Amino acid sequence: MRYVLGRIAQAAIVLLIAFTAAYTLLQALPGDALLIKFENPEAGLSPAEIALLRDTLGADVPALTQYFDVLGGFLVGNFGHSIQSGTPVREVLATALPETLVLAAAGFVSAVVLAVALAGLSQFRRLTWLRNALRSLPSLFVSIPVFWLGIVLIQVFSFRLGWVPVVNPGPIQGLILPVIALALPIAAPIAQILIRSIDDVTLQPFITVVRAKGATEGWILTRNVARNAVLPALTIAGLLFGELIGGAVITETVFGRTGIGRVTEQAVTNQDTPVLLAVVIVSAAVFVLVNLIVDLVYPLLDPRLSPTAKARS
């Protein structure tokens, strides 16, 4: 319990630092979002009405007071209101976040399946050319930008072949190309780490003993090598899943999907700082939560990493 509480405390500190950094940077942006919106002659507001609006929104109070007010609101789930639309930011995120989470989850599962398949197939030693080709694929995938891959997928599979529509696609059809664009760059580092870990574990003395007892290569790979090789891959997978929200933002923008990407694009265009701050903190919270889960799962997979084992050593 002490170990778990310590990890949770560390996660809370990281979120506080992320909030402080994001709030400071957004406040340092040039320009004033309220003036940009309401000084427009089309808004029809007088200077007195704009001043009253700024006072109501607390835009002129000291920066430190605003910081603690916003922080207190975030702690109770109140993210403020969008400057552009006046809608509570919580409602904006509640509408957009499910689409992004579905895309991120589908992309992560696809990336893991692809990485495991590449790592497993690369262990076949009979076909050397195929083994070498599969081992070179992760290096290729990791160098492909998400936005470029998305554009290529649209050009080939939608415009050239006509297999997947990009205009008014169905729920499943609308996920195919974005998931591929998101999964390939994520699968590459997982596959690289997994292949390297499998190679390292295969050279361990206990694998030689198991092989001497007559075990087949398939048995050794699935029963003895996989569990020991998965730990480094689990770490990188946790880090990459946290980054999937950022990758999903780019992917949604390329494919025109409704989600956090579209919300972020509009917030940047309109300098809607409450929405931007909420997006940053939600993304950071997902990143921290996933890595917290990884930290807690690690000792379950390898008892040597448990706090009790460390204390004994």
Image (cartoon, rainbow, N blue to C red):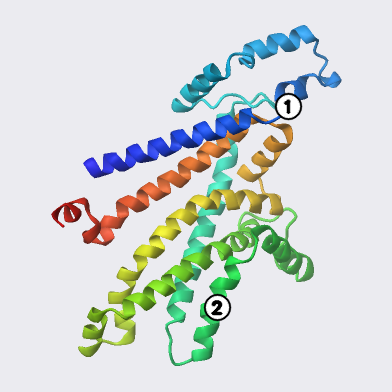
The tag on residue 31 is: 1
Tag count in the figure? 2
Question: Which circle's residue, 1 or 2, is located before the other in the chain?
Answer: 1
For image coordinates 50% across by 65% down, the residue present is 189
The crowding category of the residue bearing disc 2, from other C-alpha atoms within 10 Å (few below 14, some 14 to 19, many at least 20), is some
Q: Quadrant of residue 8?
A: top left
Camera-nearest residue between 252 and 170: 252
For image coordinates 61% across by 43% down, the residue present is 260
Q: Amino acid at mark 2?
A: Ser
**Quadrant where the C terminus is found in the figure:** bottom left
Task: Look at mark 2 in the image and give the residue it sits on.
Answer: 136
Tell me, yes or no, if residue 183 can be seen here.
yes
Camera-nearest residue between 175 and 199: 199
Residue 21: horizontal and vertical position, in percent? 53, 34
Q: Is residue 108 left or right of residue 57?
A: left
| Helix, strand or loop at mark 2 | helix
For image coordinates 66% across by 23% down, the residue present is 86
